[in-house]
Image (tube, grey):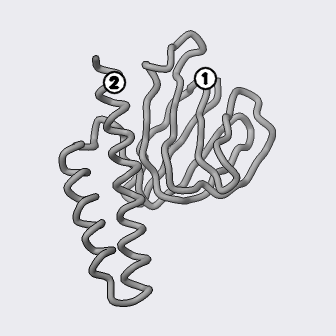
Amino acid sequence: MIRFQLVSLSGMKFDEEVYEVILPTLDGKIGVLDHHMPLVSVASRGMIAVRHKSSDPDDFRDYFAVSGGVIEVADNTLTVLVDEADHADEVDAAEAQKAYDRAQNMIKEAKDQVSLEHAQTLVDRQAVRIQVAGLKRRRRS
């Protein structure tokens, strides 16, 4: 088991011993297990998947939508620092879809590069939240 700590600007989002954590990085997804080599990396916007026990099927994983941040693995502890992290249970799929649609409209109405990049960031964030909400629904069915 490895200790996984997920910390956002609003505080500690998760702090437990787990079997496996799959993280989004700039180079793709990585998996972190017990006794992982020391690592410092950049977390990209995406989804973190947490398997609590080795015997847990995929449908029992916990999911978090995260913004980019920093990943550190040391002494059998995985620490991920991000600006935002939403557990699947915290994401309202309908609200995320509305926010996604608003952000899409912002892209169409953008008058400059800064506005366009801001709108694209919002689209990307809501797309991940919608994906996490979908996994939550699948898990419950």
Report the residue marked by disc 2: 138
Side of 48 where 27 appears, left or right: right
**Disc sitting over residue 55 in the figure:** none
Q: Residue at x 42, y 85 (%)?
A: 114
Q: Residues within 10 Å of mark 2 (few under 14, many from 20)?
A: few
Amino acid type of the residue tagged 1 in the rendering: Tyr
Task: State the image coordinates of residue 123 (x, y, percent, origin top left).
Answer: 36, 62
Task: State the image coordinates of residue 133 (x, y, percent, origin top left).
Answer: 31, 38
Report the residue marked by disc 1: 19
Q: Is residue 114 above or below residue 42?
A: below
Determine the CA span between mark 2 and mark 1.
Answer: 21 Å
Q: Residues within 10 Å of mark 1 (few under 14, many from 20)?
A: some
Q: Residue at x 39, y 89 (%)?
A: 112
Q: Image quadrant of residue 121?
A: bottom left
Task: Residue lying at the far front in this picture: please name it.
Answer: 108
Q: Residue at x 25, y 70 (%)?
A: 105
Amino acid type of the residue tagged 2 in the rendering: Arg
Q: Of marks 2 and 1, which one's residue comes earlier in the chain? A: 1
* Front-lying residue, 95 or 42: 95
* Front-lying residue, 83 or 114: 114
Q: Is residue 140 above or below residue 32?
A: above
Task: State the image coordinates of residue 67 (x, y, percent, origin top left).
Answer: 47, 57
Task: State the image coordinates of residue 19 (x, y, percent, origin top left).
Answer: 60, 23
User: Where does the C terminus fall, quadrant-wise?
Assistant: top left
Q: Residue at x 38, y 39 (%)?
A: 132
* Front-lying residue, 76 or 56: 56
Q: Secondary structure at mark 2?
A: helix
Task: Residue lying at the far bottom in this picture: please name it.
Answer: 112
Side of 125 where 44 appears, left or right: right
Q: Is residue 82 above or below residue 109?
A: above
Task: Residue lying at the far right in this picture: please name it.
Answer: 37
Q: Image quadrant of residue 9?
A: bottom left
